[in-house]
Image: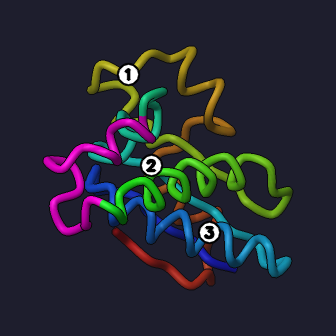
Amino acid sequence: MIAVILASGRLERLYTGLSLLVSAAADGRPAHGLATFGALPVLLDDALAARALRAEDTPGLSETGRPVFARTLSALLDTAAELDECHLWACAAAVETTSVERAAVEARFEGVLSVPRFLTAVAGAQLVAL
């Protein structure tokens, strides 16, 4: 089992975290992700692919690499939602203290968990924080 705390809103970090979750779930391993403060609003952004195309949001990528990155990032998020072994939650504190809409959270995530409850639920998992 793998557990990934998605803390950063940096697109490269989200890509890496989603890749870890999707890869594990595709191999049949339970994969659990928790989106916290920086990551939560970015993962809820309906224009995530467009964001990934902007140089200011992906400064380390080449102009020709951005479209590939944007497509793959969107595909990873979609795939994470489709895989039975992949479970994404929103951090309770982030939901309560940021301007994200509760309906958007409920549509994208399996639910809302506090960090302590998430850690209890994934006890014994390989833990990664990004």
Residue that label 1 marks: 100
Q: For the residue marked with disc 3, what is the amino acid?
A: Leu
Local crowd size for mark 1, using a 10 Å CA cut-off: few (<14), some (14–19), many (≥20): some
Q: For the residue marked with disc 2, what is the amino acid?
A: Ala
Secondary structure of residue under mark 2: strand
Please say if 85 is above or below 2.
above
Local crowd size for mark 2, using a 10 Å CA cut-off: few (<14), some (14–19), many (≥20): many
Q: Look at 56% across and 36% down and name the residue there.
A: 112
- Residue 57 image position (x, y, % from top left): 21, 48
Using residue 19 as the reference point, say whether residue 116 is left or right of it.
left
Front in this rendered view, residue 23 or 50: 50
Residue that label 2 marks: 35
Based on the picture, tell me whether residue 49 belongs to the magenta stretch. Answer: yes
Q: Look at 85% across and 57% down and name the residue there.
A: 84
Nearer the camera: disc 2 or disc 3: 3
Q: Which quadrant holds residue 103?
A: top right
The tag earlier along the polypeptide, 2 or 1, is: 2
Q: Which mark is residue 21?
A: 3
Q: Look at 44% across and 60% down and name the residue there.
A: 69
**Identity of the residue furthest to the front in this view:** 64
Image quadrant for the C terminus? bottom left
Please say if 41 is above or below 125.
above
Q: For the residue marked with disc 1, what is the amino acid?
A: Val
Q: CA distance from mark 3 to mark 1?
A: 23 Å
Q: CA distance from mark 2 to mark 3?
A: 12 Å
Please say if 5 is above or below 98.
below
The tag earlier along the polypeptide, 3 or 1, is: 3
For the record, the magenta segment spans 48-63
Image quadrant for the N terminus? bottom right
Using residue 128 as the reference point, say whether residue 32 is left or right of it.
right
Front in this rendered view, residue 3 or 67: 67
Q: Which quadrant holds residue 25?
A: bottom right
